Amino acid sequence: MAAVLKATRRTQIGTRGAKKIRQTGSIPGIVYGHGQEPVPITLSEHEMELAILHGERVLELDLDGQVENVLIKEVQYDTFGHEVLHVDLARVSLDERVEVTVHVVLRGTPAGAAEGGVLNQVTSDIEIECLVTSIPEEIVVPVGAMKVDDMLHLKDIPLPEGATLLSDPDAVLCTVTVVAEEEVAAEAVEGEEAAEPEVIGEKKEEEAEEGAEEGEKK
Amino acid sequence: MAMMPKRVLHRKQQRGKIRGNATRCTTVAFGAYGLQCLGMGWITARQLEAGRVAATHYLHREGNVYIRVFPDKPISAKPLETRMGKGKGETEAWVAVVKPGTILFEVGGVDEPTAKAALRRVANKMPMRCRFVRRRHGL
């Protein structure tokens, strides 16, 4: 069941206006889509954070008495990820197919881990197209059968019914590899040689001396 | 050996000032867990190397450790018992300039308690307060 969020039209726009809104316990946002004009809005920060916390993707937005379904497209956070700074909401109808980013969770311990293999997740979020009403919270991929040097691609992910993959199907999702042990010693030897970096645009001593000698001859 | 640039435009730099919070490199991007600094300052290449060694040693070569900052600022110093003048001193260290909120290290391929313990050891090597953060998924 989609949560109902109350919102009001916003007249204060720009950085200063947004700061003033945030000081009152609200957050600025925008609603767009379906060929209509974008509408700057003000939302309750607490209600919005609760909706995000509960994993809601589709909300009912009560904008000055007019209720419409919206999809949370983007949420901006502050530097430390504590406070919501701004939200982007897109108008959607409930029978519409939308493109969303979904988190991929690897479940289980790979069989190759017993042989010293390390599971490395290369891709953690994928783009899929699905119905607004059936956006998955996350996609679980079992990796228990993976051996050393095995690789899973995005095309191997079991998608929910009705969903199609938009990301590159040949992209790597995860690998199980054995970490080489000699890297550190090699790095240390290389590093000792490079005592000072090269200065861009500065002539080397030999070149400078040659140039001076040529100048004296002339 | 500690990290340093291969090529630089200028051999020596002025100190500069650090103002405000970080606006980039504030989210975990490569691993699943990260170490976010809460203060500002310079992190020397030696400190970064000490952090990397502490993490890899604790993880017993499991998982991956990512360093998100690079020491690209040269810090010069005069030798001891030297009179003032005679030009700027020679480069003594390379540092990374960090603002509050910058992700310094990331760890992937291990479970959360292990990553937390590894990053706590890294935090002990850093010159400012740091905190453990998780990757933010979806919204």
Image (tube, rainbow, N blue to C red):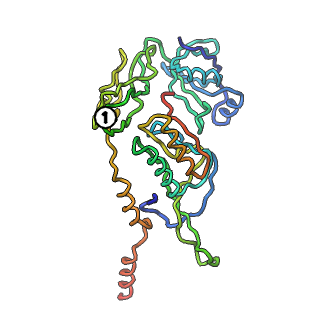
Residue at the extreme bottom of the image, as rendered:
A217
Give left or right: position of A153 versus B104. left
Residue at screen point 60% across, 21% down? A50
Crowding at mark 1 (Cα within 10 Å: few <14, some 14-19, many 20+): many
Residue at the (46%, 21%) spot, across then down: A137
Disc 1: which residue:
A112
On screen, residue A100 above or below B80: above
Taking the view exactly as shown, the residue that stands out farthest to the right is: A24
| Relative image position of residue B71 (x, y in whole percent) | 50, 56
Foreground of the two, B76 or A48: B76
Q: Nearer the viewer, residue A83 or A26?
A: A83
Q: Is B103 located above or below residue A75 in the figure?
A: below
The chain holding disc 1 is A
The residue depicted at 41 percent of the width and 37 percent of the height is B109
Residue A212's spot in the image, x, y percent?
39, 83
Element class at badge 1 = helix
Left or right of B115 in this view: B99? right
Q: Is residue A145 visible?
A: yes
Tally of numbered tags? 1
Left or right: B82, with B136 as reference point: right
